[in-house]
């Protein structure tokens, strides 16, 4: 098992229980209306924007921008094998635009995060996000290259297939698989580095305790 299995298993179990994940169809059987997309996928779009690094203060505007694009290009959903892949592609482009705007203003990118969608009762993912494993996952993913970060998030958190990711990002399967392998390798190295540093810290604390 990989270093991130503890996080992947946690998020996968949540994903399987999610009504959003339950509608991951392999083909668009009919074109959804704008109202249907908004009702069924608003939370999915909002969370993806946040996971892809959109700052909390920009989430409402970014979400609105995504749905403006959806409204203008509603017929485009017929070009994708799933509505989810189409929405992810739009969300990735909008999130990247907002992250770059923020980067120009502040000189750094907003790290990936997971926040409560409606500000009311916490969702299952919000509860899981309180765990140290998920906080560590967020911090390490934020250190990946941008093109690897997006694919890694879609694969590991959204459990999307390489085919769906390729559709969403307009990439061929070989590119998706290559970047995902590179992202996983880099992520595992980051985890190993973190674990080594944590062990050194614990060892130092034990030595200090013995010397006192």
Image (cartoon, rainbow, N blue to C red):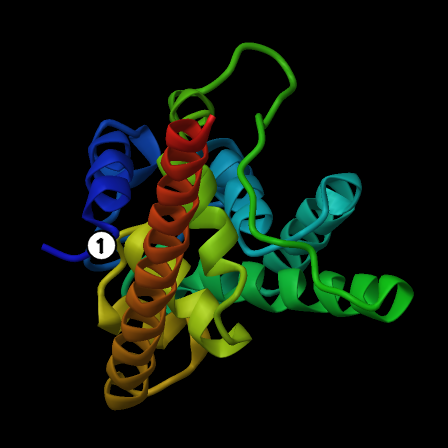
Residue with the most extreme right position:
105
The image shows residue 188, relative to residue 200, as above or below, that is below
Snapshot quadrant of residue 106: bottom right
Q: Residue at x 58, y 28 (%)?
A: 117
Left or right of residue 63: residue 203: left
Q: Secondary structure at mark 1?
A: loop
Residue with the most extreme top position:
121
Q: Residue at x 37, y 62 (%)?
A: 193
Measured as percent of width and height from the top left, residue 6 is found at 22, 41
Question: Total marks drawn?
Answer: 1
Q: Is residue 208 visible?
A: yes
Residue at the spot of label 1: 3
Residue with the most extreme front position:
211
Measured as percent of width and height from the top left, residue 177 is found at 24, 80
Q: Nearer the viewer, residue 20 or 157?
A: 157
Left or right of residue 45: residue 65: right
Left or right of residue 55: residue 86: left
Measured as percent of width and height from the top left, residue 18 is found at 30, 30
Q: Is residue 79 visible?
A: no
The image shows residue 108, relative to residue 148, as above or below, that is above
Q: Residue at x 49, y 77 (%)?
A: 147
Q: Residue at x 36, y 37 (%)?
A: 133
Snapshot quadrant of residue 91: bottom right
Q: Nearer the viewer, residue 77 or 43?
A: 43
Q: Nearer the viewer, residue 135 or 49?
A: 135
Quadrant position of the N terminus in the picture: bottom left
């Amino acid at each position: 098992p990989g270093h991130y299995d503890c996080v992947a298993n946690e998020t996968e179990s949540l994903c399987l229980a999610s009504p959003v994940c339950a509608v991951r169809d392999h083909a668009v059987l009919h074109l959804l209306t704008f109202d249907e997309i908004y009702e069924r996928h608003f939370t999915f779009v909002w969370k993806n924007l946040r996971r892809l690094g959109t700052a909390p203060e920009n989430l409402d505007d970014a979400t609105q921008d995504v749905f403006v694009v959806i409204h203008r290009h509603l017929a485009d959903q017929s070009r994708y094998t799933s509505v989810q892949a189409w929405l992810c592609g739009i969300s990735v482009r909008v999130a990247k635009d907002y992250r770059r705007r923020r980067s120009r203003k502040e000189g750094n990118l907003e790290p990936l995060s997971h926040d409560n969608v409606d500000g009311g009762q916490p969702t299952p993912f919000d509860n899981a996000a309180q765990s140290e494993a998920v906080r560590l996952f967020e911090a390490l993913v934020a250190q990946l290259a941008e093109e690897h970060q997006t694919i890694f998030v879609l694969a590991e958190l959204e459990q999307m297939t390489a085919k769906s990711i390729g559709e969403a990002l307009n990439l061929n399967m070989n590119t998706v698989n290559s970047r995902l392998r590179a992202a996983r390798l880099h992520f595992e190295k980051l985890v190993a580095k973190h674990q080594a540093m944590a062990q050194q810290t614990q060892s130092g604390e034990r030595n200090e305790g013995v010397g006192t």
